[in-house]
Image (tube, rainbow, N blue to C red):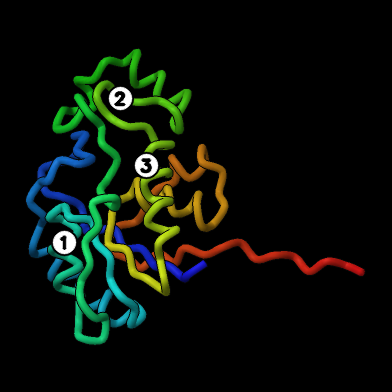
Amino acid sequence: MSPIVAVRPPPLPGTRGVCYGQTDWPPDLEAIAATVPRLRAELPEWPILSSPLQRCLRLASRVLTPRHGALAVDDRLMEMDHGDWEGRCWTDLDPTLLRAWSRDVVGFRPPGGECFADLIERVGAVVDGLTGPTIFVTHAGVIRALWHLVAGWPARQAAVEPVPHGLPIPIRRPRQRARRA
């Protein structure tokens, strides 16, 4: 398994309380500019693979230096598709559906959208195609899928784990315990 470091872009302005998975909101360019120096100092010199959404692509293109090679973009690294919920305030969504989602965070599919299990499958295809160490500039849902796929976390745990913005997040396989003879 190739090593992976993931980065989630800075928060988007004006999106507090809004469901915006694949909605391509304009990023906060000042927040990106403030994040870049730290990322350039802390990220390894590996190729960068980015989601095509502006918030990721803008960050990836600014972090990119010649040492990383060319920036690659992969649509499969987009955030989970929340379907009919996209762009709506969480408080305006049907509470019955939100409760159903909280009971089944892996398998529940918002109307017209995808479930976390679908996202895991999509991201798994990217991971399977890696040929070396890679930096992913992507979204919270994708990073959660990576924790499940690569680090071996239970999907239900990974699906709800908080994901920090603007920091390198190493995604590591769990260490194998030595067998006793």
Mark 1, residue position: 57
Give residue 39's mark: none
What residue is shown at x 37% (from left), y 41% (from top)?
Answer: 119
* Image location of residue 99, percent across then percent down: 39, 19
- The answer to which of marks 2 and 3 sits earlier in the sequence is 2
* Image location of residue 51, percent across then percent down: 23, 56
Distance from Cα at disc 2 to Cα at disc 3:
13 Å
Distance from Cα at disc 2 to Cα at disc 1:
26 Å
> What kind of residue is marked 1?
Leu
The correct choice, above or below, for 143 with respect to 101 in the image is below
- The answer to which of marks 2 and 1 sits earlier in the sequence is 1
* Mark 2 or mark 3, whichever is nearer to me: 3
* Mark 1 or mark 3, whichever is nearer to me: 3
From the viewer's perspective, tell me whether residue 125 is left or right of residue 82. right
Mark 2, residue position: 110
Mark 3, residue position: 119
What residue is shown at x 41% (from left), y 19% (from top)?
Answer: 100
Look at the numbered disc 2 and give the secondary structure of its residue.
loop
